[in-house]
Amino acid sequence: MGLFSKFIAKVSGKSSALAEDWQELERALIEADLGPKLSSEIINQAKDLRDSDPGAALIATLSKLFISKSRSLATTDPLTVILIVGVNGTGKTTSAAKLATQLVAQGNSVLLGAADTFRAAAVEQLQTWGARIGVEVVSGAVNSDPASVAFDAAQRAQESKVDYLIIDTAGRLQNKSDLMDQLGKIRRVVEKVAPVSEVMLVVDATTGQNGLSQAKIFSEAVSLTGLILTKTDGSAKGGIALSIESELGIAIKFIGSGEASGDWSAFEPDRYIQGLL
């Protein structure tokens, strides 16, 4: 059942809603991880749409929160470089692999860079995906310099003339300035070889408002260009992604709902809203 289906059912066909209905809706918005400030703004704007029924006003208000930036991957000829960043456990490695799978299925050549050198399982996971989809994976020794692996991957991508290089980075805790510095270093060394077209932050849909603080810190370190929302299966609400997009102006580009390669799709605002409702 949608998060706001009770509200929609109550006000369906009505020209107005009771004060307690709006209060109940505001609580639902906060529970969906949109945060108190944004939730309050949504309620006030929806109330102001006098010529709409409350349900339609809510949909219209939510729709306006999405920014007009392109949700397509930015590309650079001849090589498009994509950095996948985020904190531990959000699904960065799986997202990198799924994106590679999608690009290969579309007829592109791809190379993967396993720069999460502090976690052997991440490198092995990426190598398994690479073998499955026929994509080369550049990696280094355990605990080696991630920036060095990223640089080697960029050079290899350029030499092999692939269309896309996707680099999986280590999980970065947003309160660790040294790790943020390392992420900035990765970007700088890669750009000695080729420009970085996309820096995509992977956000766990269950993360809550902490996701907004993560996005702010990552954006300051490496200038984010897009969001990937993961773990949207089960009871995850995912309102935090809309909160990040609205406040920071970073477009949600992809949705991941599970571990399989098919559990991945381009983000569609209308579909997202219908899921919330």
Image (tube, grey):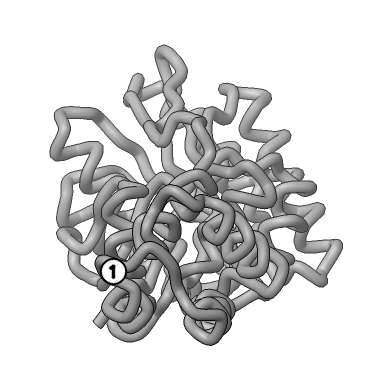
The quarter in which the C terminus is drawn is bottom left
Q: Nearer the viewer, residue 10 or 186?
A: 10
Q: Nearer the viewer, residue 267 or 29?
A: 29
| Secondary structure at numbered mark 1 | loop
Residue at left 65%, top 72%?
35
Above or below residue 49? Residue 144 is below
Residue 128 image point, x, y percent: 25, 63
Q: Is residue 131 left or right of residue 127?
A: left
Quadrant hosting residue 243: bottom right
- Res 59 visible: yes
Residue at left 17%, top 45%?
134
Q: Is residue 167 left or right of residue 44?
A: left
Residue 73 image point, x, y percent: 40, 32
Above or below residue 235? Residue 113 is above
Q: Which residue is mark 1?
A: 257
Residue 26 image point, x, y percent: 56, 77
Residue at left 31%, top 49%?
270
Q: Nearer the viewer, residue 111 or 7?
A: 7
The quarter in which the N terminus is drawn is bottom left
Mark 1: amino acid:
Ser
